[in-house]
Image: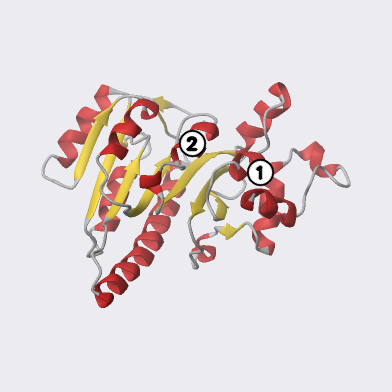
Amino acid sequence: MPVVNGMGQSRSTVPKQEKLEAIFNQHLNVVNVIRKNYQNEGWSFPGYVYIDATAGCGDNTEVGAPGSPKVFCKCVETFDLPHTCHLIDREPHNTSNLHNLFENNPNVKIYTGENSDVLYDVIGTLRGTPFGLIYFDPNGVPDFDYIGTICQHPALKKIDVLIRFSATAIKRVRTVFDNHTLKEYISSIPKQCWVIGEVAHKDPWQSMFALGLNQKIHGYDRYGLYPIDSSSGSVLLRRLNYTVKELSDPLPGQTTIFDFGQAVRA
């Protein structure tokens, strides 16, 4: 997979961005309904915040697909939601390009630096407890410990988390370094509900999305993302969690969705 300015780009990028657009639209649609309910009750809506922790340059030039910042901004334009978009990237070339793309958009804020350093500055700008989504799409295995820690911040109480990564990479690292399983990583992040789905069929890297929600949001199954407490989700989680060798064993580890659900609620 070629890496351009710190951004991985391959044939799977196009279906990934198509699924990402569906995820954004579904999430924005649900929050837009919540906003209308706030209005009907005479309450002040706290706004929608999108944080892209690995924003890139805004374009996947090698494959001709828009980057996640452009995908989100396209989606949010179709909803009447007061929003702020925070874009973070460690490469100055990428953030320079983002400035050029969004220079006329007052809702977009751009930051150069490691997201582990910048995110607390971004969180410091939030007022109240807005709704929203924080997106991590790193090259390699995500820092699940850091993501779990950042998600505990009170300002992110109503902000859901979306992570894109390779399940195959996690399994390979685990077999060498005896690291956690995918199931254990996800369960360590303090979200009430999870939906998961693969980016593309028969992808050897098993690139996938994991969406951690503060409450259940229905409708993602039509995009190939399933709640982990559903029959389809539990089957998918088991396949993504274990190696081929482990799956050939009669009972590899704790395979029931009940065990996983208990861990998430603990």
Q: Residues within 10 Å of mark 2 (few under 14, many from 20)?
A: few
In the displayed orientation, state which residue is furthest to the right. 250
The vertical placement of 248 against 224, above or below, is above
State the residue position of label 2.
Answer: 149
**Is disc 1 surrounded by few (<14), some (14 to 19) or many (20+) residues within 10 Å?**
some
The picture quadrant where one finds residue 176 is top right
Foreground tag (2 vs 1): 2
Amino acid type of the residue tagged 2 in the rendering? Thr
- Residue drawn at x 47%, y 30% is 139
Furthest toward the bottom, the residue is: 40
Give the percent coordinates (x, y) of residue 220: 50, 63
Type of amino acid under label 1: Lys
Label 1 belongs to which residue?
183
Q: Horizontal placement of 61 versus 135: left or right?
A: left
Q: Helix, strand or loop at disc 2?
A: helix
For the point 49% across and 42% down, which residue is it?
164
Q: Earlier in the sequence, mark 2 or mark 1?
A: 2
User: Visible in this render: residue 58?
Assistant: no
Mark 1 residue element: helix
Residue 14 in sight here = yes
For residue 31, which quarter of the picture? bottom left
Residue at figure coordinates x 31%, y 54% from the top left: 130
Q: Nearest the camera: 124 or 253? A: 124
Q: Which quadrant of the structure image shows residue 100?
A: top left
At 31% from the left edge and 39% from the top edge, which residue is drawn?
Answer: 123
